[in-house]
Structures are given as C-alpha cells and as structure tokens.
Image (cartoon, rainbow, N blue to C red):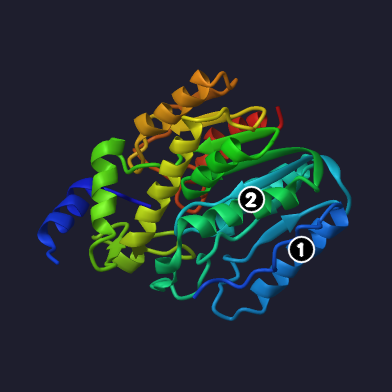
Amino acid sequence: MRRANFNAILAASLLGTVASSCTRAPDEPDAKTFADARRAIEHDIAMDAGDDTLSLEGRTRFYHYGRPVSHAILLLHGFTNCPQQFDEFARDLYARGCNVYVPRIPHHGKKYRLTQDLQDLNVAEMRAFAERTFKLSRLLGTRTTVLGLSLGATLAMWLAQTQPADLVIPIAPFLMPAGWNRTAGGATMRAAMLLPNFYWWWDIRLLTGTRPLYAYPGYPIHALAQITFLGDSIFDLAAKAKPLARRCVLVLNADDNGISNSVAADLLAIWQHQRAPYTEVILRDLGKPRHDIIDPTTFPDARTLVYPRLAALALS
C-alpha cells in the first residue's frame, strides 16, 4: 500500500482542521491442551464463516497436523489487511512441519472495503487479542514463534514484553509513521484524537483502487492513533522491566516508507539496555520504497527476497 506524502498531508490536515466489532469466542482461561486450543480456534473460524459481512480472504486461518508439533507459529497481519496477507507464507511454514495460526485482528476482513468498523479499535482490545491468540498458540507446539507485520508487529512487540514466547519477530512495527519521532508524532496523534474521526486514504490518487482488493483502502484516523498508543504502552513497560520473550529479532526494511525505523530501533535499544538478548536484521535492496514486504499481491518478489529469510529466522 502506497503511503507517499503521508506525513506532510496528515500534518496539514490536522493543522487545517478546527474544531461493529467482530464476534469472537469468549476467553479460554482453562485451555490446557492442543484439543482445547483447536476447539477455540475452530470456533472463531466458524464464526467468521457465518458472518456475511466478512470476505473469504478475511477469515482466520489454521494449518495444523491434528496434534502438537515441535514448532507452532502465530502470524499477525498488518493494519487494514487481513489473514490473506500471510496465507502463502503460512502454507510454506505448514509444509515445513509447523502448526500455523493466522487470526483475524478485530475489525479487519470486512467485505465492504470502506467500512468504518476500524473506528472502534482500541488499545485494550488489541492487547487482549494478542494475549489470547498467543495463549492458544502455546498449546499448538513445543516452541512458539510470533511473527507479525506493521500492526501485527506492534502486537508481537507487546507479546515480547509481556509473554514468555520462545521467539518474536516484529517486522516493520507501526510505532510511529515514517519521519516522525515519538515527541512530535505522539503530540500529533493525541491532537488527532481531539478531532472528528475522519477517514484517511492510503493513496489519495488511487482511492478505492488501492491494492490488495481484500484490504481496506484507508482507515479512520483515530484507529491509527490507537496503534501508536499501544506502542507507547510497550515503551512504558520496557523502561521498567525486562521483556519476557526468550528471543526477539526486529526486522526492518531499510527503504520503509510507512513507519519510523528509528523509533523501532529505540525500543530495541531499551530492551537491550534491560539485558534482553534481542537483535536486529535490516533488509536492503528490496526495490522501491515500501512498507508491506509480505503480501505477494502487491510485492511478488516477497516470495524470493523475504520469505526464505523470514522462514530461516522463524525456524531457528
């Protein structure tokens, strides 16, 4: 999804302006076995299938061998996209012997691409979603890897801070838009929450022609602010305590035009200061600047330039 001139246009809009949640299974506090997790995930899949507001591409995915295996992988899609974004990569990991769970993030995956459902996205809901899906994932294999892109990477970072994952791989986490630091960006996002919840296009030139066609072409600005607030909560916790995940590898695209790589690196530095053995991988030479380096619909070269490296990391 193209984000050209995002920062300048958003800032201008803020200066120039004056003045339905998805249905999920209830929490499974007593889930203790693979069978428990499978029932909960399949319940969600059935609920998605029965919801005629959702697209086929938007439904939760679960590729499994009917039993726990050595490696379970939780894949978390990006903001305004849906589980289809990770489907090819998920199938590849499944073929390598993994149980792979690709849940639908709340308010995503709707057939109507101009839905305003994202206006209800909030920090508490995102945290609860991440923690629930991780707890189910832990029952699917001996080792658990969490891998996410953009919003999914921010959720993965929350899990790295708060949950005992074996490995977390946040890819291009959306902590702040490209070009902004936490001070200026945070002030802008707080100001945005005081304004009417206006809709923002990913590409003002293409509007509804923005691809992929199973993702939303834009979003309510308050939803974007809520994601940065989730990032703030991770920074706050990281300053106080060592993260709980055993390993974390932050993956950044050197030519990312959507998120601030420096803010992501700042969080990694805090974790390293807390003596967490966390590292960084920077991907280069992926072609023109882009944020989504996963979805093969918009970036076919992901299959050869990105997937092999991520699979090697995820299975390490």
Q: Position of residue 214 (x, y in %)?
A: 49, 65
Q: For marks 1 and 2, give the one nearer the viewer.
A: 2
Secondary element under disc 2, as helix, strand or loop, is helix
User: Residue at point 60% right, 20% down?
Assistant: 277
In this rendering, would 117 be left or right of 73?
left
In this view, 125 is above or below 264: below
Q: Secondary structure at mark 1?
A: helix
Q: CA distance from mark 1 to mark 2?
A: 14 Å
- Tell me residue 275's x, y (percent): 56, 18
Which residue is tagged 1? 40
* Callout 2 amino acid: Glu
User: Pointer 2: what residue?
Assistant: 131
Of 89 and 54, which appears nearest the observer?
54
Q: Front-most of 193 and 119?
A: 193
Badges 1 and 2: C-beta atoms under 8 Å apart?
A: no
Q: Is residue 263 visible?
A: yes
Front-most of residues 190 and 90: 190
Task: Sort mark 1 into few (<14), some (14-19) or many (20+) by Cα contacts within 10 Å.
Answer: many
Q: Vertical placement of 264 versus 227: above or below?
A: above
